[in-house]
């Protein structure tokens, strides 16, 4: 029986895809890098093969006897020091995997991309698969790396590889042991979201994303992409819902012009925030999407968002309860400093505006 190969099975989305494939009855082979945490695939009836997607020879060994490939391996990071690595893993990895799938003559490839590859939507809007990518000017390495990786996959697939792309939005749910997609929730619960500006994002349940992969395999059109997204949230609404579920107070909302500065100041205080100024800037966009195409063509749908948020918060509260409780009591000074900084900055901006108006310069 031909095997199905899955890369990235130890990751958040990949581990859920692995479970879904096993439940479907696939004879599954998964790639595992040396030193990887395999706790999320323990107990699954899968064949493991040592493989690094940046090593073409190990990929060829992994592909031997495989007829279908799910490529879910990738890297998510907003740290400036990871910029080069993001392109190596996301773009380089896709290039290697797709090229080797072409060489091996597999019958189907399902590529896990990201809704971020489309860029953010206009303020208050929602993007779909047809949106023109204009987000390069934002200078966000992760976004640019997944966009370029997807473009490279389709370019190579044009040689005759039956490839379908799925674009999950921000996946929440239980089991993110590497703290990647749900990092915002963990940071919120630990009181490490120092400030936020107006913006939004789409949240989808990771278990529904896994189902979307299987539906894309069964019903997806070759050469097409499908956004897998759930609820579009403003950050006001998301933080209010997370606060209601956890008892943690929402962070400070500030004007976009002040958000990165406040994040930088709180970063040097006790308990160091894990959110960088670049993350705050990125979060002030509207990463909001429509999934109508996946619903129409794949029969896919997302579960109620309340269930997803509850499962995510419950997983972290069980996993890090004591740490979360301690954090609530240790960050008061930081927020007092941040609040004072916001007040001073807003007064300075207001004073500058009055001066400019007096000189007749404002608005030129």
Image (cartoon, rainbow, N blue to C red):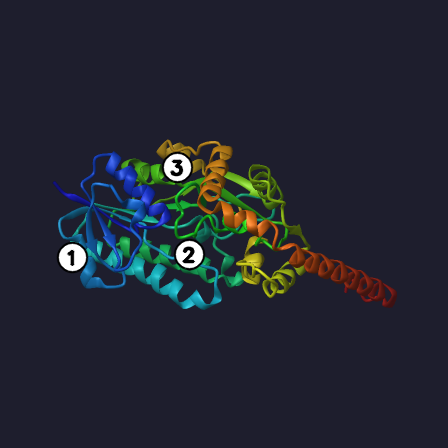
Q: Which residue does the image show at 41% across and 41% down from the upper left?
A: 174
Q: Which mark is residue 313?
A: none
Q: In this image, 363 relative to 82: left or right?
A: right
Residue 286 visible from this viewpoint: no
- List x then y, in percent, for residue 288: 52, 45
Q: Which mark is residue 208?
A: 3
The answer to whether the residues at label 1 and label 2 have Cβ atoms under 8 Å apart is no
The residue that disc 2 covers is 76
User: Which badge, 1 or 2, is on the more N-terminal residue?
Assistant: 1
The answer to whether the residues at label 3 and label 2 have Cβ atoms under 8 Å apart is no
Instruction: Give the alpha-carbon distance from disc 1 to disc 2, as whole Å.
Output: 26 Å
Instruction: Give the alpha-carbon distance from disc 3 to disc 2, as whole Å.
Output: 20 Å
- List x then y, in percent, for residue 274: 53, 58
The residue that disc 1 covers is 61
Instruction: Give the alpha-carbon distance from disc 1 to disc 3, as whole Å.
Output: 31 Å
Quick one: quadrant of the N terminus? Answer: top left
For label 1, count other residues whose C-alpha is less than 10 Å away and answer few (under 14), some (14-19) or many (20+). few
Q: In the figure, 54 relative to 251: above or below?
A: below
Q: Secondary structure at mark 2?
A: loop
Q: Which residue does the image show at 19% across and 60% down from the upper left?
A: 58
Residue 73 versus residue 125: which sits nearer the camera? 73
């Amino acid at each position: 029986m031909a095997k199905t190969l899955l890369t990235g099975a130890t990751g958040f989305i990949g581990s859920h895809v692995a479970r879904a494939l096993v439940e479907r009855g696939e004879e599954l082979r998964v790639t595992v890098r040396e030193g990887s945490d395999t706790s999320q695939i323990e107990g699954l009836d899968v064949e493991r093969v040592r493989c690094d997607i940046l090593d073409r020879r190990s990929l060829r060994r992994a592909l031997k006897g495989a007829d279908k490939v799910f490529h879910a391996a990738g890297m998510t990071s907003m740290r400036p020091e990871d910029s080069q690595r993001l392109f190596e893993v996301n773009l380089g990895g896709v290039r290697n995997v797709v090229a080797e799938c072409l060489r091996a003559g597999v019958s189907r490839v399902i590529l896990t991309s990201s809704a971020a590859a489309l860029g953010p939507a206009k303020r208050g809007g929602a993007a779909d698969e047809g949106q023109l990518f204009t987000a390069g000017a934002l200078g966000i390495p992760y976004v640019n790396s997944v966009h370029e990786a997807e473009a490279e996959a389709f370019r190579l697939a044009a040689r005759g590889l039956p490839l379908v792309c799925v674009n999950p939005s921000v996946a929440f749910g239980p089991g993110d042991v590497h703290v990647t997609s749900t990092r915002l929730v963990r940071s919120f619960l630990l009181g490490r979201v120092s400030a936020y500006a107006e913006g939004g994002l789409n949240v989808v349940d990771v278990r529904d994303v896994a189902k979307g992969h299987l539906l894309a395999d069964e019903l997806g059109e070759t050469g097409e992409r499908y956004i897998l997204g759930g609820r579009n949230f403003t950050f006001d609404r998301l933080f209010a819902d997370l606060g209601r579920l956890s008892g943690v107070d929402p962070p400070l909302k500030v004007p976009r012009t002040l958000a990165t500065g406040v994040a930088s100041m709180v970063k040097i205080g006790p308990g160091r925030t894990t959110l960088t100024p670049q993350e705050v800037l990125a979060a002030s966009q509207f990463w909001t999407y429509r999934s109508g195409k996946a619903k129409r063509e794949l029969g896919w749908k997302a579960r109620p968002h309340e269930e997803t948020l509850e499962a995510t918060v419950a997983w972290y509260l069980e996993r890090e309860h004591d740490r979360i409780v301690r954090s609530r009591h240790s960050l008061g000074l930081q927020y007092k400093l941040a609040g004072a900084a916001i007040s001073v900055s807003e007064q300075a901006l207001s004073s500058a505006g009055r001066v400019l108006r007096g000189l007749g310069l404002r608005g030129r």
